[in-house]
Image (cartoon, helix red, strand yellow):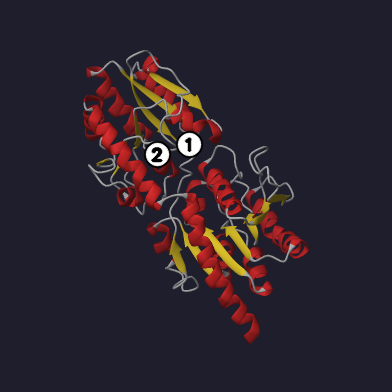
Amino acid sequence: MRVAYVCMDAGVPIGGTKGCGVHAQEIIRALTRRGASVDLFAARIASGEVGDPGGHVRTHRMTTRPASETSEREQASLDGNAVLYAALQDEGPFDVVYERYSLWSFAAMQYARAAGCAGLLEVNAPLIEEQACERALVNRAGAETIARTVFAAAHALLAVSNGVAGYLNEYPEARSRVHVLPNAVDPERFRPGLPPAWSPPRGSFVIGFVGTLKRWHGLQTLVSAFDLLHRSAPDTRLLIVGAGTEEERLVADLRRRHLGEAVHLTGARPSSEIPRLLASMHVAVAPAPAIANFYFSPLKIFEYMAAGLPVVASEIGQIAEVIRHGDNGLLCPPDDPVALAAALGRLRRDPSLRVRLGDSARASVLRSHTWDSTVERILQIAGSSRADAGAQKVRV
């Protein structure tokens, strides 16, 4: 089977350290494990991160002309559709075209329609709202038009959460073709028993966090909770893996609370190092804040669970669907450092509870949340879509 994997979003480096890039890389790896030959068409590829020793992945960098102004960058991305369409024609035919939705890209799904192959569109966020609120969006009307165009062209839309599925179903062009496929994990890479990458002082109890340091990850709540716990349990240590826009504020908060010696910040680390960093932790945290329309599918949750770690997380969105309180983790109200500190303290005092929750967490992801099972479902959807596409092409 030949698969064209497309990502025209320059903010998503395929591979690298960002969760979005890891997601793309893991889908590609799982496809090749199923014997697929993958052509990657991407605006940004992290050097050294994509590829396989069997030569099943061919990469095609889809660069756009440089631009300094937001409106110019938007137009340059729009212009990239012609280049992408031509590249797909040159490198095809393909059995499946799989695209990670980006604001200005529509050529891949249109190519799939014209070629009569399955066109699957993965949607990870309500990008128009996200771009307008978090960054800058000049041509909103154009982005809306492209969204409707690409949603209509796709044979199936793959949402990473029920929140994203709800967003997609607001568009008549997408209804009845939306499937929910959460994030997942490779349980062979993330497993218990790996040698730890970080050695804290002997006898320490290590609380860990992995992710980009951004406001929607609840870092302020995490630091407040750790401060409360550390006062009564000075053996506790906090290991924070990642980098981002909140790093300066985080460091200032730690300094103000005199927690510097109890907290270790690694900065951004390659995905290959994350399993051993998780092995350095006794418990892992996902303290997401109370955000309206929480649509995220936190990759960290599945990696924590596969590593056999007990997880303490906010009771919100998909997190509360994956974590069953008292069975495979502990849930706390969002933005409640007192509750978070109490849950962490409980796990510190009860090693047997840590083992039970960690074992149950790993069993949960093995049953339902591996990249291989996700790709199996993707290929099933693609098979149905190919049949539909073939029938449509015959009728035309």
Nearer the observer, 282 or 332 = 282
Q: Is residue 192 left or right of residue 101?
A: left
Nearer the observer, 336 or 252 = 336
Question: Residue 50 is drawn in which quadrant?
Answer: top right
Give the vertical position of 81 relative to 24 (above or below).
below
Nearer the observer, 97 or 78 = 97
Query: Mark 1 belongs to which amino acid?
Result: Thr
Give the residue displayed 63% in from the left and 39% down from the top. Answer: 49
| Residue bearing mark 2 | 217
Query: Mark 2 belongs to which amino acid?
Result: His
Q: Is residue 210 visible?
A: yes
Q: Do the residues labelled 1 and 2 touch (CB within 8 Å)?
A: yes
- The quadrant the C terminus occupies is bottom right
Q: Where is residue 251 in the image (x, y as percent from the top left)?
A: 43, 23
Give the residue displayed 32% in from the left and 38% down from the top. Answer: 359
| Residue bearing mark 1 | 212
